[in-house]
Amino acid sequence: MSLLQHPVFRRLYTAHIIHIIGNEFTFIAVVGLLNDLSGSGLSFAAGTVFRMLPYVLTSFFSGALVENWDKRRVMIIVNLLRGILVSLFFFITSVTYLWVAFLLLILVNICSAFFQPAMQVAIVSSVEEKDRLAANSLLQGTTSFLIIVCQGVAAILVYLFSYRYNFLLDAGCYLASLFILLRLPQIANASVTKTTAGYLERLQEGFRYISKQKEIGRVIMYQMAERVCGAYYIMLMFYVLTERGEGLYVFGLLDIPLGLGGVMAGILVNRISYRLGEKGVTAVQGWALVAMGCSIVAVFHIKPILGLAVAILFCSFASFGSSILSVTKLQKLADPSYLARVFSIREMATMGSFSVSCLILGYGAEKVGSATVSVWLGVFGVLAGMVWLWSRRRLEKTEADVY
């Protein structure tokens, strides 16, 4: 692919692949650790909140800080810190140190909040606008493929050995990614000049910019709704491990259809979006939320494992597809001077809604059962999708009347 011929994107892509491999090994290990130490639905939800809330709060200001920093150096330091922190999970063996596990989750995700805006600026700086949808599709498709492969391998390793070794594998992957980024060429950033404005002033400018750019605000609101639906995954942990009493390796194997849905989205979205045009893409986004809502209800009401896997596949395809389209739209809409701030605010909003939803859903699942809560979430997804479609049609009609 021509994209991989570009030295900056090629190294970003390679580093991304390696650390995603490690992430998938660690994810199943964290689930196993929390299940061993507690096993309650609330503990799974708390684990997600302790991952996401620090990410959300740090994202509030990370974009404004990263804007004037060397993006390459930021990504290198973040990967070094994450590698060290992840390795410490290996030594947590008692419920007495559950708080240490949560603390490590907090610190790892504080670091991660600086990586995302730095990488987005690097991608936009190195990839021409016409190629960005293909770049995002490639990144998402590869990530999802790695979920399939790595979760399958991780499930086998967990079944045969211990999940704890996965933490060490992830630490090694972060360090390998770091060494690739060390050779990252200078990132061209001609369109974004450094500003001498203070941090708080830049942060306020970012919020004012989004408030004036109504379309950017709408896309972020849409992604918040998608992330609320995506929080069904926290219930899936409780449902599979506690309500169904399945082994940890079964939960790992169910991530395979999750990854397969992302691969399908990465391939198909890139192919059909140019044919559909802006109106068609908008319609796809709305119907994707509707599909997520219906699939979520199916996930928690279908008893055979195969049927459950198929429902997860459909939900994943809708979720990843909407995410690819939304990220590409934001990259297109945002002024390069505000890009890091836009994406950090977007991360704060979307992951904030995800974190709150995880806590509510985890608590609700433990109190009334996953099946009941899934119906509430499914209805929300369908309504959110229909509201998006209605609002876009209304906006198009208003614009047509003006002209």
Image (tube, grey):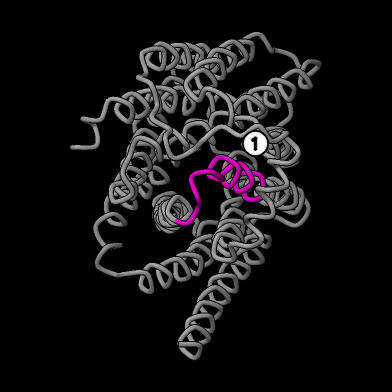
Along the line of sight, the residue nearer the viewer: 366 or 170: 170
The residue tagged 1 is 64
At numbered mark 1, what does the secondary structure look like: helix, strand or loop? helix
Q: Position of residue 153 (x, y in %)?
A: 38, 25
Majority secondary structure in the magenta region: helix
Q: Specify the quadrant that holds the N terminus.
A: top left
Residue type at the position of mark 1 = Ala
Q: Is residue 14 magenta?
A: no
Residue 369 percent across, percent down from the top left: 70, 55
The boundaries of the magenta stretch are: 333-350
Residue 69's image quarter?
top right
The number of numbered discs placed on residues in the rendered structure image is 1
Instruction: Answer yes or no: is residue 311 visible.
Output: no
Viewer can see residue 287:
yes
For the residue pair 54 and 339, the one nearer the viewer reads as: 339
Binning the other alpha carbons within 10 Å of mark 1 as few (below 14), some (14 to 19) or many (20 upward) gives many
Q: Is residue 91 left or right of residue 291?
A: right
| 15 over 314 or under it: above or below | above
Residue at image point 40% right, 11% down: 179
